[in-house]
Amino acid sequence: MTDNHEAVKTVADGLAIMTVLGTLNDWLPPIASLFTIVWMGTRIWESDTVRGWTNRREKPNAVDE
């Protein structure tokens, strides 16, 4: 169990360092914007309205929201 905690700490430290470097280099806002655009595009594409427009049926294993 200790090995998992150490691995998680290492990953978190790496992400923290990347966040600092990204902030210092002004990369973080454009990257965050890109991920936001992709996420919102996916949410819109999977919405009931767009599914109706594109004649796509809901997947049988889809989770109700």
Image (cartoon, grey):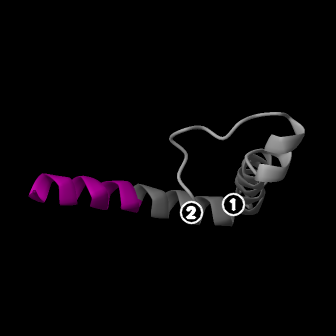
> Residue 26 at what x, y percent from top left?
74, 62
Any mark on residue 1, and which?
A: none
9 in the magenta segment: yes
Q: CA distance from mark 2 to mark 1?
A: 7 Å
Residue tagged 2: 19
Callout 2–callout 1 Cβ contact below 8 Å: yes
User: Local crowd at mark 1 within 10 Å, few (<14), some, or many (≥20)?
Assistant: some
Kind of residue sitting beneath label 2: Thr
Quadrant of the rendered image containing residue 30 = bottom right
Q: In front here: 28 or 62?
A: 62
**Residue 34, percent from left and from top:** 76, 51
* Residue designated by label 1: 28
Q: Residue at coordinates 76% horizontally, 55% vertically from top-left?
A: 40
Q: Earlier in the sequence, mark 2 or mark 1?
A: 2
The secondary structure that dominates the magenta segment is: helix
- Residue 15: x percent and y percent? 47, 58
Location of residue 5 (image quadrant): bottom left
Query: Which residue is painted at 71% across and 52% down in the image?
Result: 39
Horizontal and vertical percent for residue 21?
59, 60
Q: Residue at x 71, y 36 (%)?
A: 57
Count how many numbered circles sit on residues in the image. Answer: 2
Q: Residues within 10 Å of mark 2 (few under 14, many from 20)?
A: some
Furthest-left residue in view?
Answer: 1
Q: Of residues 50 and 10, which is closer to you in this image?
A: 50
**Nearer-the-camera pick, 54 or 14:** 54
Query: Start and end of the magenta stretch?
Result: 1-13
Secondary structure category for the residue under label 1: helix
- The residue located at (53%, 52%) in the rendering is 63
Tell whether position 4 is magenta. Answer: yes
